[in-house]
Image: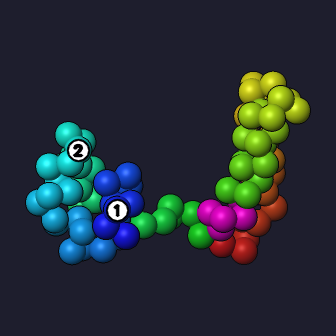
């Protein structure tokens, strides 16, 4: 995990506070400081269900199956419809 820690912000406090890793990247300290303001998951209880649909549309755009604009518009429309449909279940 230590080798990959310089590529991402690791979840282990022992790595997050490692001075050698902090010196390895100029953005490390800012990333660590942001952890105090972050939350682990979005407040939306159904984040993963909504996120799957959005991810499909991003993939459609990246693979050229849809234009970016069309894919993002469809993702927004599908997300709004999903949220309306599941409003009472939240």
Secondary element at tag 2? loop
Q: How is the image coloured?
A: rainbow
Q: Which residue is mark 1?
A: 3
1 or 2: mark nearer the eye: 1
Q: Is residue 1 above or below residue 75?
A: below
Q: Residue at x 38, y 55 (%)?
A: 8
Q: Quadrant of residue 27?
A: top left
Q: Residue at x 38, y 60 (%)?
A: 4
Q: Assign the N terminus to one quadrant of the image.
A: bottom left
Marks counted in the figure total 2
Category of crowding for the residue at label 2, using alpha-carbon neighbours closer than 10 angstroms: few (below 14), some (14–19), many (at least 20): few
Residue 71, percent across and down?
A: 79, 34
Verify whether residue 31 appears in magenta: no
Verify whether residue 49 appears in magenta: yes
Q: Which residue in the rendered view is the most extreme toward the front?
A: 3
Residue 37, percent across and down?
A: 28, 57
Please give the range of residues in magenta: 46-50
Q: Is residue 2 above or below residue 66?
A: below
Residue 15, percent across and down?
A: 24, 69
């Amino acid at each position: 995990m230590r080798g990959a820690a310089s590529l991402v912000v690791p979840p282990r406090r022992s790595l997050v506070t490692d001075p050698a890793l902090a010196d390895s990247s100029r953005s490390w300290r800012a990333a660590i400081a942001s952890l105090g303001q972050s939350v682990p998951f979005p407040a939306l209880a159904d984040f993963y269900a909504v996120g799957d649909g959005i991810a499909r549309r991003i993939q459609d755009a990246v693979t050229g199956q849809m234009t970016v604009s069309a894919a993002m518009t469809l993702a927004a429309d599908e997300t709004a419809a999903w949220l309306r449909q599941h409003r009472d279940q939240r």
